[in-house]
Amino acid sequence: MSELHFRAATVDDIPALVDLVTSAYRGEVSKQGWTTEADFLDGNRIDAGVLRHDIERPRSRVLIAERDGGLLACAHVCEEDGAGYFGMFSVRPNLQGGGVGKVVMAEAERVVREDWGLPAMRMTVIDIRDELVAWYERRGYSRTGIKKPFPYGDPRYGIPKRDDLRFEVLEKTL
């Protein structure tokens, strides 16, 4: 099996990225992996307009991980408040747990540290996702205790099935 190849997404990648991100988090296919949010969120995980903005804005990069020309994973990194921000992290459900995610995360951290010279990486995770938070903690991220509200009423980010969703900020010094 060949190595992963990384590149920055272009607007031509938007339909494939929307499909990948949705498959990793929503609907029945997402339940093949362990990152599913299908039990507490329906609808979109990413909006094509938001994704386009992330691809086109300065100090923002949507990383695509490919192997032999096939899209396997993606993540969005950008500069936010003097640190890197990591989001939209998605691995094809049938590949989750196989090490692809670790390699993608390492590349995202490299971009923020080496290309942009930023001292830390932050992310937000739905705080009820204990298994996911534990995965990030094993990779050096810490819970900050900072909570942010879930965007209830904005269908671009999903349709909640419960009323207790919120984000917690995780951070890692690079």
Image: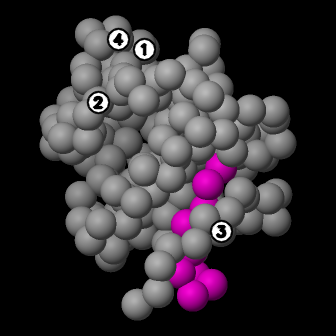
The answer to the question of whether label 4 and label 3 lie on touching residues, with beta carbons closer than 8 A, is no
**Residue 122 has which mark?**
none
Name the residue tied to disc 4: 147
Residue 166 location in percent, x, y? 34, 20
The residue range painted magenta reads 62-70
The image quadrant of residue 15 is bottom right
Residue 100 location in percent, x, y? 37, 66
Name the residue tied to disc 3: 16
Three-letter amino acid code of the residue under disc 1: Pro
Figure quadrant of the C terminus = top left
Q: Is residue 152 left or right of residue 8?
A: left
The residue sitting at 83% across, 42% down in the picture is 56
Q: CA distance from mark 1 to mark 4?
A: 7 Å
Three-letter amino acid code of the residue under disc 3: Ala
Q: Is residue 15 above or below residue 161?
A: below
Furthest residue toward top: 146
Which of the two discs, 1 and 4, sits closer to the camera? 4
The answer to the question of whether label 1 and label 4 lie on touching residues, with beta carbons closer than 8 A, is yes
Name the residue tied to disc 1: 149
The image quadrant of residue 133 is top left
Q: Is residue 69 magenta?
A: yes
Quick one: 27 or 147, which is closer to the camera? 147
The answer to the question of whether label 2 and label 1 lie on touching residues, with beta carbons closer than 8 A, is no
Q: Residues within 10 Å of mark 1 (few under 14, many from 20)?
A: few
Name the residue tied to disc 2: 141
